[in-house]
Amino acid sequence: MKKLFTLIAITIIALPSFAQNKPLPTTTVRDINGKKIAFNKAFEPGKVTIVSFWATWCIPCKQEIKAIKGKLPEWQKQAPDVNYATVSIDDARASAQVKTYATTQGWTFPVLLDPNSDLKRSLSFSNVPFLIIIDKKGNIAYMHTGYEEGGENEVFEKALALSKE
């Protein structure tokens, strides 16, 4: 019985990591200046894009973004067609803090806002940190929930493999 329970638990946890070729939702989000954009049009076509979903109150989210930001220049030397962006799931009241936080952290990558959790619902995730990798065709090639120190290296390996396709 314990083996069956363990197998079911592993399957449920691992299942989101195997989402292959799922098209991006057309859900409307905003950039940090308030401009509306369809999520599926927010990224440069023909490039692999890593997208971190986060919130101002989420410590592991901030750790993940800081780790990726620190390694991004090195990654882009190895794979110039790999981009990075973030999506805040903070509610409308906290959205004003997102722009300030991103500016003080020196973020130069796109920062999008999902204050009503519409995008979060269309991607069917419940917790942050949540990360997706978008392939060159604009499909979701990888999804992952949670962050552990060093996990960004695995993410880059997956992005690098996609950039070589």
Image (tube, rainbow, N blue to C red):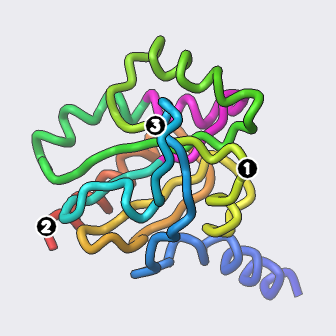
- Of the two numbered discs 1 and 3 on the same chain, state the one appearing first in sequence: 3
Does residue 108 show up magenta in the picture? Answer: no
Q: Looking at the image, is mark 1 or mark 2 nearer the viewer?
A: 1
What is the spatial separation of the Cα atoms under label 1 and label 2, in whole angstroms? Answer: 36 Å
- Of the two numbered discs 2 and 3 on the same chain, state the one appearing first in sequence: 3
Residue 65 vertical position relative to residue 127 in the rendered view, above or below: above
1 or 64, nearer to the observer: 64
Report the side of 47 relative to 23 (left or right).
left
User: Percent position (x, y) of residue 108?
Assistant: 32, 27
Residue closest to the far top:
104
In this figure, which residue is indicated by the disc labeled 2? 164
Report the side of 73 relative to 133 (left or right).
left
- Of the two numbered discs 1 and 2 on the same chain, state the one appearing first in sequence: 1
Using a 10 Å C-alpha cutoff, classify the residue at mark 2 as few (fewer than 14 neighbours), some (14 to 19) or many (20 or more). Answer: few
In this figure, which residue is indicated by the disc labeled 1? 116
118 or 1, nearer to the observer: 118
The residue depicted at 15 percent of the width and 74 percent of the height is 165
The residue depicted at 30 percent of the width and 68 percent of the height is 135
Determine whether the residue tagged by mark 2 lies in a helix, strand or loop. loop
Residue closest to the far front:
35
Using a 10 Å C-alpha cutoff, classify the residue at mark 3 as few (fewer than 14 neighbours), some (14 to 19) or many (20 or more). Answer: many
Does residue 63 show up magenta in the picture? Answer: yes
What is the spatial separation of the Cα atoms under label 1 and label 3, in whole angstroms? Answer: 16 Å
Q: Amino acid at mark 1?
A: Asn
Q: Which residues are magenta?
A: 52-66
Report the side of 114 relative to 104 (left or right).
right
Determine whether the residue tagged by mark 1 lies in a helix, strand or loop. loop
Residue 71 vertical position relative to residue 53 in the rendered view, above or below: above
In this figure, which residue is indicated by the disc labeled 3? 111
The residue depicted at 53 percent of the width and 23 percent of the height is 99
